[in-house]
Amino acid sequence: MIPNILSFIVFLPVVGMFIVLLLPREKKTAIKVVSAVFTGLQIVLAWQIYVNFDTNTTSMQFVEQVKWIESFNIWYFVGIDGLSVSMVLLTALLSFIAIIASWNIDKAVKAYFALFLLLDAGMMGVFVALDFFLFYIFWEVMLLPMYFLIGIWGGPRREYAAIKFFLYTLLGSVLMLLALLVLYFNVKDPVTGGHTFNMLHMMDQANHTGILNQFNIRLLVYAALFIGFAIKVPIFPFHTWLPDAHVEAPTPISVILAGVLLKMGTYGMLRISFPILPDAMKWEPFLYGFVTLAVINIVYGSLCAMAQSDLKKLVAYSSIGHMGVVLLGMAGLTSLGMNGAVLQMFNHGIVSGMLFLLVGVIYDRAHHREIDGFGGLASQMPIYTGIASLAFFANLGLPGLNNFISEAFSFLGAFGSEAFNLKVFTIIGTLGIILTAGYMLWTLQRVFFGPLNPKYVNMPEVNTRELITLVPLGVLVIVLGVYPNLVLNLLEVSLNNLVQTVLNAPSVLLGMQ
Amino acid sequence: MEFGHYLQINLASLPYFIPELILVGTLLLLIIVDLVLKDKPSAGWLSLIALSGVIIALIAVIGQYDLGTRSLFNGVLVLDHFSLFFKVLFLAAAALAILFTMASIELAGRPVGEYYTLLITLVLGMFLMAASTNLIMIYISIELVSITSFVLAAYIKRATRSSEAGLKYAIYGAFSSGLMLYGFSWLYGLTGTLDLYQLARSLSEVASQNPLAIFLSVLFILAGFGYKIAAVPFHFWAPDVYEGAPTPMTAFFSVGPKAAGFALLIRFFVSGMAQPSLVESSMWQAIGDIHWPQLLAVISAATMTLGNLIALVQNNVKRLLAYSSIAHAGYALMGTVVLTQEGYFATLFYLVAYYLMNMGAFLVVIVFQDLIGSEKIDDYRGLGYRAPIAAIAMGIFLFSLTGLPPTVGFIGKFYLFAALIKAGEAYYWLAIVGVLNSVISLYYYVKIMKYMFLDRPAEEKAGALPVTLSMNLMLVVLMVPIILFGLYWAPLQEFTRNSIQFFTGTF
Amino acid sequence: MMAVGLHHFLVLSALLFVLGLLAVITKKNAVTVLMGIELILNAANINFIAFSRYVDTDLDGQLFALFVIITAAAAAAVALAIVLNIYKQMRSVNLDEADTLAG
Amino acid sequence: MIVDYVVWIILLPLISFTIQIFFGKRLPRQGDWLPTSVMFVDLLLALIVAGKVFSAYDPDFRIARSFEWVVLGTTTIKFGLLIDNLTAVMLFIVTLVSSLVHLFSIGYMHGDPRYSRYFAYLSLFSFSMLGLVSVDNFLGIYMFWELVGVSSFLLIGFWFEKHSASNAAKKAFLVNRVGDVGMFIGILLIFAITHTFNFDEVFGKIASGEFAGALLTAAGILIFCGAVGKSAQFPLHVWLPDAMEGPTPVSALIHAATMVAAGVYLVGRTFVLYTETALLIIAGIGTITAFIAATIAVVQMDIKKVLAYSTISQLGYMIAALGVGGYNAGLFHLMTHAFFKALLFLGAGSVIHAMHHEQDMRQMGGLRHKLPITFVTFLIATMAISGVPGLSGFFSKDAILAAALGKAMETGTLYHYLIFATLIFTAGLTAFYMFRALFLTFYGTPRNQEKYDHAHESPSTMTIPLIALALFTVIGGYGSWFEELIRKPSLAMFSTGAAQEAAHAAAEGAAHGAHTIAMVLSILFAFAGIFIAALYYYWNKYSAEAVSEKFAALYRFLWNKWYFDELYQATAVRGTLLLSRAMGWFDLKVIDGIVNGTARMTTLLSFGSGTTDNRVVDGLVNWVARIVGWFGATLREIQTGKVQAYILMALGAFILLYVIQLAMV
């Protein structure tokens, strides 16, 4: 067991970034190899974490705590529990795959990989940070590389998409900054009595002092946090950055965007909003608003997906729908729903990653993504079609593949919620099941079935590099579909604890309004 | 009291006045050397003299940190950590301005003797601004700074835009100080004193009788201060002057006199128009019913919003940065409205951060101006590929100006917002205005980034630009602390926190 | 005969101030505008001296006025130099024509 | 022991699927032998299981074994197998038909470019179907339910180059999904109330009264939605005729014998769930389906379409049977129908194969000479489905009619009498259209001489399954074992207290009284149907064309399948697409428009003029950004460059600030 493993997994890419920066610009292969090695090492570390993770405790593990800025009581404080470990694993996996998928990047290679590694570090950092300030730093650090990765290496409207992404997410995070400050000044450190950024202290309602005991302030803080996270998820109507960003981003970045970045919104809610301000979360106007938005996400996202003619945009909107399921699962505050939601975060990361990679494969060959511009690829590219069908069916929630179980749990959890009556919402949400099947199959049909488009009679089959990126995800799709416990075991104890904490949090403050 | 007694006090004050004396010595030396070396290529020597004078003064200032707090020259000036903080900042800005001047070709070939003389005089004036506790001294120091600024702005005699900048500066400046003076005269009439501390005492008696009259004089006075920090609605001169003045001077103007204005503003309001809060030791409260904190809050919000909105539509980088610097004055003002230790600390901290990043940004403008002969944002297209170090440095300065971690600009904003949030719900609105402004500002900062990195250079001018080593070195020197302090800012914070010790006693 | 009191001075100063203001705003000639500013400064000076005589006991106000006169002279000198420079380039001292820096 | 056999029965096809999908192409003969032999092993195992289960000869025979699949806090989800008499029968039916279809396919699919893939899909289907009939819980049945759906999708769209095939596949999956979502919601409801998926546990809660009333009815109807989709019941029956785009053996296996019967199985399996109200609806749906499909079948010209509608109609019978409480009858018909309908499809397949993929009966005729084996077996099956006494179909259909009449007599409501009347009339229709198809295909003179000349009897891999199925069609209805072993489950079985025996006997007893009447009527209608068919198509006494011209409107109505497709196309499909396009447009133009802008501020200002409406709506969302930009540009204007203007404005602001202060004081 490696000591300080979390620091290693966060800062390893930074080391890699510096090495890449030191390499001469012409040594493109060396740069790529270094990046692959460092993200590969990250996977090794992630595996170590997986192996050594104690699934029976609710407390934080692999904790490291070093004082950073004394006067503001800011700590370098990292640690993971069941919620974060799944995200750490996902990030490590997708980062590596994205690096492999980036192999054909040819423009400004050095800058690309350096920025990518920085992004990687930022993502990891978000998932391990337990000090809110540190969390915020990592959260913001991701924006910058993302802006450039979309803006320089993206599609035709990349500049527009990049700035849109940047502005949107910054808007969310500055609101989060204010919320963070309100929390800081009104949570006391049980040890020193001073203010604290320590999330664990913040979660203990007994530490809340000052205006944080006023319900309207709590609602305000919750709302600010919510908008910050909602933009990332993204929740309707804060979602319009997503289709553009996804479409314009290069394939590996789309993978990261959909696979990891979207999860940060829901992760933030589960790590911060819910446990720190449970009563605001449970306040009925908020909760029902939340669920309404979740359902809108599902139905609206799916309908929009159906309307798209651009394959990548379709996948992007499909993500909006699937994240809606995550939100629905979370809202019910049942252990089934919560576990389903987080598992869905993981699964969606895998499936959407796969879908974007698949889109990338044909985009590389055909240089367009018009759904109607293909047709009959199944007879030309059988292996590709097979993998694509797997991903498509996973995406539409076919049992035996990973998305099914997480979606089913999310719906079950929401429907069976005893704390709130979400039955009608869930029933509307299940419309998404039909709609998703509708647009996925329709797409499958238009792209792969029918007579082969004569333009593509010489379309080459997927190559080895592409298979290296696709197959591991495909295997996970099946394995997790059959045996979700691989991930659920990690989550369960922590999430059940989370559910209990939020459920049992006193609602007496409601009266003080 | 007899004349001898005053002389005694004045002589006794002199040992505490050494940095100022060094500056006076330097400027005299500059004049002499300039005369002696007339018609000979003397720029190098003069620059060196000016630079060494500044550095020696800096050493002397740092030496004064142990001297404690005291009143000088019969209470017209003070020596306290607060003023020392600003003096360090002024000297650092001046040093960079000199270095910029040396490196820039905009001023090459022009007689620099007067230029440096004026610059050092300007610094001297700012020293006095930061340390004044008497209305006469405040007026004189402001005038000293203003008059030299007018000349410096108009320094490139043959360039119309430089002259025009000087003229506007002069008229607007003289007008503003006229208003301020009129305000001073009313304040004097209402309280019967020119000393800030007595003013506070006297105000607490008369404030309730004449709140509107006092407020009116405060408004008049704010016209003077606001003009110095370029706060809305007294900012109008700034964009034109910033654009018209020689770029090294613009860099200096946007940091030095602005900081001096903040020093004055804070001291005037804290010492003269506020009293320590009875509730909490680290807080003050406004005297009487004069709502100047609210007034500052409105001005702060208006300043950042207007600065950012207009910056949004600029195509000239220099002018864009001018508006951005207006916006930053608005941010820094946020710290002054809450009347807390944290607030003033945040403002001071922000000024340091602003010094680093704004100087850096202007340096890049100088670099590109020298190399491509343009300040137009369109001409920045593809510079990321032609001058990567400068462009990356620009990126870091701009992100710091936006307030993104891990840069010192983020920490500065963080402290400002922290101060507001800590002060309670009454200031949440200002904090929200502040963060929304950050988002708006991102757009135009990133616009520059877009042109530099996202756009490719035109075919005919794709070659690498010959950025000199000294320029690159300076860029790195500015870039590194921005990141370093963004990651570990405890030293800077200690330094700043140590500076919130006002001279509060009476004599 | 009515005794001359503080408020007479104040009214005079206010009149001067307003006149100065009007000159600054309306006159196109740079030199006239500078003269308007001088009026404003002198309005303040009258206030200082009057207050010094009627309100304060010491001479602070009169001292201030002296300083103002000196610095105003300096400022005017610099301003006029710049105006002169402008005149050399543009053959005009009309302030409305000095608007190349705008927007 | 038995459980282990069942586990292997389920797993073997999965293994063969895995091997076949990855390595099929590289195996000798493209691996067709592997899934085929696996299925025969499965058949053997199923026979062993059936033997062991039936040898106990216990109607309440039940083995349930499960393991904890997922444990989340207080929620434990178990997964396991439930083996009782019904499962044993189902295992037998599925493995029998499946293995015969595999065998048949070797000949039928010979030379297809995706030959190996075909067998892989068949294996996947077999696995899913076998799992479906063996699992012990709602979630599990839902999972296999979807899996059979996807195998069906893959097989219908097997010749995906044809647009019609891929369309049909998509349609099948989507229409099924509609039903499945209903079922899913039902499962959500059941789980929310009982906190378990396990059949026995859920039934236990019903028995103990914890789960009752309107919610129980709702749950039952929702679960039934799944059956409506899968068993192609009205109004979701539209996918099944299109599903005939798949290879004919697939139609035999999936869309006739097994998968479509899964809905019937589901209702049978969860029978305790259905309250009286729910059963009324089920009976009604089944009856309507039986009738509508039969009327459509009368005018079809495509041999497979006739069979498809006949399948829908027969499934309607089964569902109706369950609805009227004829539990045993419905499931009995499921079994016999599996035999004769698979036989009909394979027979049709043999004909189609012989006619070089000609499916239109107007191109056939007189084929009995060319395809003797096919003809004889087809005849047997036709007689069975028509209810000719002595064959299996007669017994099961008779039981259904008896149950319906019994129910009607028991309740005495018009509703139930109507059901009985419709069913018995439909029985006549069935005999008519089946014999019509038989006569058109095998009798008369060849209508397409060229195809006729090339036709020849199919190879033995294809005829052996025909013969085997014909055998089962003949003997399948004999003996009373089915009636005795597959008994309607009663709540008593699941209540924790002492089992109250024979509570179920009453309803069955009532049916007995009606038996004779039903039998007589049934035979009467069957022969009437056959006779009329013969009049028109054998003896050619009357012209079918003349009739269709006389009742042109009716004919068109039937020919167009009651316009269901058009209706759905116009409402659900068009509506969804329109909505989705509207949403997509909305998203792009309105939501997104707030954030960024292309149109100018002038558009905003000229809002009232109406001429720029489009662009205004277009930019609704872009307004924020645009307004910000507009402010910037406007504010920029005030920076005129004239220093006196600056001073004036500063003074204006100055006065404004003072006025604000005055207002504040």
Image (cartoon, rainbow, N blue to C red):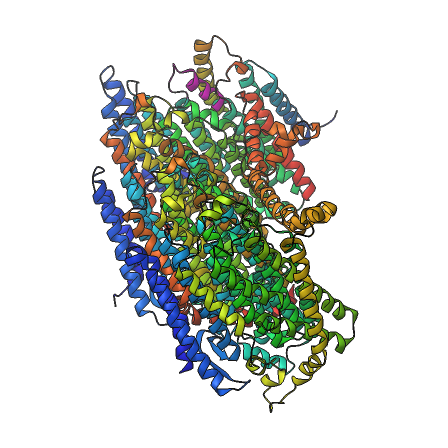
Point out residue C21 in the picture as x, y percentages from the top left corner. Answer: 61, 23
Helix, strand or loop for the magenta stretch, by majority? helix
Q: Quadrant of residue A90?
A: bottom left
Instruction: Count the marks.
Output: 0
Front-most of residues D324 and A421: D324
Residue B196 seen in this snapshot: yes
Q: Is residue D341 magenta?
A: no
Image quarter hosting the N terminus of chain C:
top right
Front-most of residues B113 and D3: D3
Point out residue A254 in the picture as x, y percentages from the top left corner. Answer: 40, 46
Q: Is residue A297 above or below residue A243?
A: below
The residue most toward the bottom is D498
Front-most of residues D521 and B346: D521
Point out residue D624 in the picture as x, y percentages from the top left corner. Answer: 57, 38
Q: Is residue B286 above or below residue D430?
A: above
Q: Is residue D149 left or right of residue B189?
A: left
Front-most of residues B267 and B318: B318
Name the residue rendered at 64%, 59% in the picture.
A285
Residue D289 seen in this snapshot: no
Q: Is residue B256 above or below residue D137?
A: above
Which stretch is magenta?
Answer: B154-169
The residue most toward the top is C91
Q: Is residue C11 left or right of residue C34?
A: right
Point out residue B466 in the picture as x, y percentages from the top left corner. Answer: 25, 26
Q: Quadrant of residue B256?
A: top left
